[in-house]
């Protein structure tokens, strides 16, 4: 069965970086786009960026453009999201999610809690 | 920057019908926006209900349906159950990439 399994919770200090992983299984990794989405406490879901897992092409939301990097390791069927220069407002649940090209989102990871606190 | 607007909250009685809408600041929503709808409960990952405006996944209950209505995307719940109480988010594809709506808090009362 399709699974997206994310890395565990992180606690970071302001100004630090965090790298969250999302390991896919149960399907052909390079046949789907993977997205990163976050939800801060009491806030809406927020799209952060995508990676085309076959070509490695990436697009980021303008809001995170300057401090986000999304990568993938096809040999490990894993995508990574690194967010730099963390501030308290980055405290959120971070999710990966899968899309079949053409707009069909389906499966989600379980979420990774990132807490930014001094 | 594209802004996507949903009703902040709606209330429906068990067994009733309710329609949630999703509007884009750039103009009428069409199939080209590839609307997806998600159900979100506290402490859980979002669950995708509808993709590409009106298509259901194998796990989507039959009482959920997606459509275009008056220039907006719409999610209709028919025969609402208590477990449908949740936040519902739409997601549109635009020139800015993917953009989520602000979410609708659905109360079943």
Image (cartoon, helix red, strand yellow):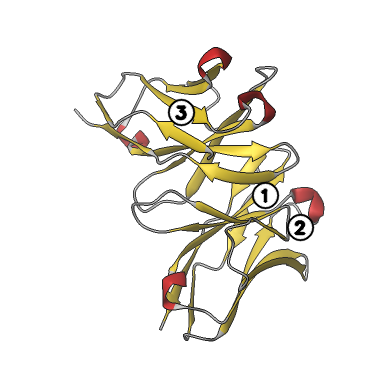
Where residue A22 is drawn, which disc sits there?
A: 3
Contact (Cβ within 8 Å) of mark 1 with mark 2: yes
Contact (Cβ within 8 Å) of mark 3 with mark 1: no
User: How many neighbours does mark 3 have within 10 angstroms: few (below 14), some (14-19), or many (20 or more)?
Assistant: many
Tell me: residue B56, above or below residue A72: below
Q: Chain of mark 3?
A: A
Q: Secondary structure at mark 2?
A: loop
Q: CA distance from mark 3 to mark 1?
A: 23 Å
Q: Residue at x 77, y 71 (%)?
A: B70
Give residue B37's position: percent from left, percent from top.
Answer: 60, 57
Q: Residue at x 36, y 28 (%)?
A: A7
Q: Secondary structure at mark 1?
A: strand
Callouts 2 and 3 in the same chain: no
Callouts 1 and 2 in the same chain: yes
Q: Quadrant of residue B77?
A: bottom right
Where residue A36 is drawn, which disc sits there?
A: none
Query: What residue does disc 1 label?
Result: B92
Query: What residue does disc 2 label?
Result: B29
């Amino acid at each position: 069965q399709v699974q997206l399994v994310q890395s565990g919770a992180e606690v970071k200090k302001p100004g630090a970086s965090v790298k969250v992983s999302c390991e896919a299984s149960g399907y052909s990794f390079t046949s789907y786009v993977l997205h990163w989405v976050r939800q801060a406490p009491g806030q809406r879901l927020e799209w952060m960026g995508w990676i085309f897992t076959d070509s490695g092409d990436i697009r980021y939301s303008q809001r995170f453009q300057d401090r986000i990097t999304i990568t993938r390791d096809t040999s490990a069927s894993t995508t990574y999201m690194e967010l730099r220069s963390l501030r308290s407002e980055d405290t959120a649940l971070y999710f990966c999610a899968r899309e079949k090209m053409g707009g069909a989102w389906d499966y989600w990871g379980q979420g990774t809690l990132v807490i930014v606190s001094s | 920057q594209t802004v996507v607007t949903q009703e902040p909250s709606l209330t429906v009685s068990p067994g009733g019908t309710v329609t949630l809408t999703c509007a884009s600041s750039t103009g009428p929503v069409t199939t080209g926006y590839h609307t997806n709808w998600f159900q979100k409960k506290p402490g859980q990952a979002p669950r995708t209900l509808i993709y590409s405006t009106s298509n259901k996944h194998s796990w989507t209950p039959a009482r959920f349906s997606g459509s275009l209505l008056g220039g907006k995307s719409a999610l209709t719940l028919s025969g609402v159950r208590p477990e449908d109480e949740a936040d519902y988010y739409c997601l549109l594809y635009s020139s800015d990439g993917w953009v989520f709506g602000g979410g609708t808090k659905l109360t079943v009362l």
